[in-house]
Image (spheres, rainbow, N blue to C red):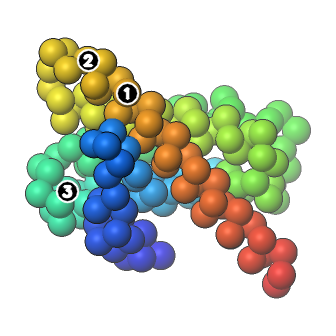
Amino acid sequence: MVVLFIGLQVFILNNIQIAGFVNPYLYIYLILCLPVNAPKWLVLSLGFGVGTAIDYLTATPGLHASATVFIAFVRLILLPMLLPLSRTEDENWPTVKYFGWSWFLRYIVIFTLLHHTLLFMLEAFSFKLFWFTAIKIVASTIFTLLLLVFTQRIQYSSEDRM
C-alpha cells in the first residue's frame, strides 16, 4: 500500500496543479490511518521513510520528510487527546468505521492543515509571498481533504461489502 500511495503521489497527483495553488498530497493518509496504538518508532520511521521517498522522487530535498515527520510526531501527542473517552479496544484505527465522519473530518483537517502549513512555509522560506503561500495552504488543504474523504469512503464502502 505504501508503494501504491507513493507512486500515485509522484506520478499522478504531483502533476495536478490548478492555477499554481492546488497541490494535493494524498500520501499523508499513510500516516493518518496508522493504528491508534502503533509504536512510536513505527509512526516516526514511516513518516520519515515516506517523506524521504517523495523528496527523492520529486527532487525536493527534505521538504516532505520534514512535514511528514512533523505530523507523525504531532500525531503521537494529539491523537490520544482527540480520541473519544468512551472508545473500546476494538476501535484501534482512526477511521470513519470506528469513530464516525464528524470525528474523522476533524482529525484529518487538523493534520492536513499542519502538514501543508509546514510544507509550504518551508518551500517559500520567506514571508514576502505570505498571501500567496496562505492561499496555497488553504486551497491545497481543501483539495487534499476531498481526496482523503474519497479514499476513506472507498475503503469504508469496500469493507462493508466483505
Query: What numbered label is drawn on residue 135?
Result: 1
Label 2: state its secondary structure.
helix
| In the image: residue 117, left or right of residue 60 | right
**In the image, what residue type sits under mark 1?**
Ile
According to the image, label 3 marks what residue?
55
How far apart are labels 1 and 2 at the CA level?
A: 9 Å
Q: Is residue 154 above or below residue 98?
A: below
How far apart are labels 1 and 3 at the CA level?
A: 23 Å
- From the viewer's perspective, is the residue at label 1 or at label 3 nearer? 1
- From the viewer's perspective, is the residue at label 3 or at label 2 nearer? 2
Q: State the image coordinates of residue 53 (x, y, percent, origin top left).
A: 24, 63
Q: Nearer the viewer, residue 33 or 127?
A: 127
**In the image, what residue type sits under mark 2?**
Phe
Q: State the image coordinates of residue 151 (x, y, percent, origin top left).
A: 60, 63
Q: Residue at x 75, y 39 (%)?
A: 103
**Disc 2 crowd, CA 10 A, few/some/many (<14, 14-19, 20+):** few
Query: What numbered label is drawn on residue 130?
Result: 2
Q: State the image coordinates of residue 28 (x, y, percent, origin top left).
A: 45, 53
Q: Residue at x 63, y 39 (%)?
A: 107
Q: Nearer the viewer, residue 69 or 90?
A: 69
Using the rendered view, name the quadrant where residue 102 is placed. top right
Q: Is residue 23 above or below residue 110?
A: below
Q: Residue at x 21, y 44 (%)?
A: 63
Task: Say which label, 1 or 2, has the lower sequence index.
Answer: 2
Q: Nearer the viewer, residue 147 or 156?
A: 147
Task: Say which label, 1 or 3, has the lower sequence index.
Answer: 3
Is residue 155 at all visible to an observer of this figure? Answer: yes
| In the image: residue 126, left or right of residue 12 | left
Using the rendered view, name the quadrant where residue 59 is placed. bottom left
